[in-house]
Amino acid sequence: MSHERVLHGFIQFWSETETEGGYWAFFHKRRALTKIPQGHCQTCGLFVQNITTEKLKPCSNGQPHCEETSLAILDHAWIHVLKNGDQLTIYDKDGTKIVWEGTIELIPYPIFSQQAYDQWIHADQTGIERETWARWFFDEHPATIRLAQ
């Protein structure tokens, strides 16, 4: 049995300043859609007692998915810019049908050299047409991810 944790959320084109181009990114659903109070498990939301933000501790609720979870100490959504080796599954907007799944293999580009839907992009995914890939991210499709080791 694998101990890799599958994260559920959605994908989005993400740019820190919206002027230098953007990245293909995954947003963790629980962290992105709800603000979890400080001192609560980032995965299940349960309160973890006697912990400060300087100390990170697994949730003690006994659930396997919380074994490596730390406290919610961020005020914003958890964002993961896709990296080579990540295992991504993208679903249709209803979340019922897989539209793409595979390993991320990005082809990087110099800044301000490539665009998708009038946005500067930093990379393309190998083996998929750019406009199709970009549309899934701009439309914020549901997705799951296993992070590269």
Image (tube, rainbow, N blue to C red):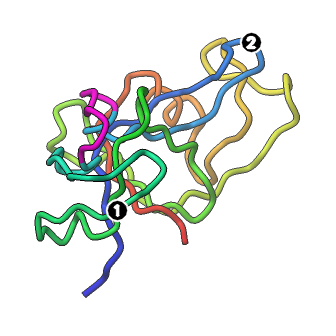
**What residue is shown at x 63% (from left), y 53% (from top)?**
126
Residue 34 belongs to magenta span: yes
Left or right: where does residue 138 sit relative to residue 61?
right
The residue tagged 2 is 19
**What residue is shown at x 18% (from left), y 72% (from top)?**
64
In this rendering, is residue 75 above or below 9? above
Q: Residue furthest bottom?
A: 1
Q: Amino acid at mark 2?
A: Thr
The image shows residue 40 at horizontal and vertical percentages of 24, 44
Q: Are marks 1 and 2 in contact (CB under 8 Å)?
A: no
Q: Secondary structure at mark 1?
A: loop
In this rendering, is residue 120 above or below 129? above
**What residue is shown at x 30% (from left), y 82% (from top)?**
2
What separation in Å lies between label 1 and label 2 (alpha carbons)?
Answer: 37 Å
Quadrant that contains the N terminus: bottom left
The residue tagged 1 is 57
Left or right: where does residue 127 sit relative to residue 61?
right
The image shows residue 93 at horizontal and vertical percentages of 24, 30
**What residue is shown at x 66% (from left), y 26% (from top)?**
22
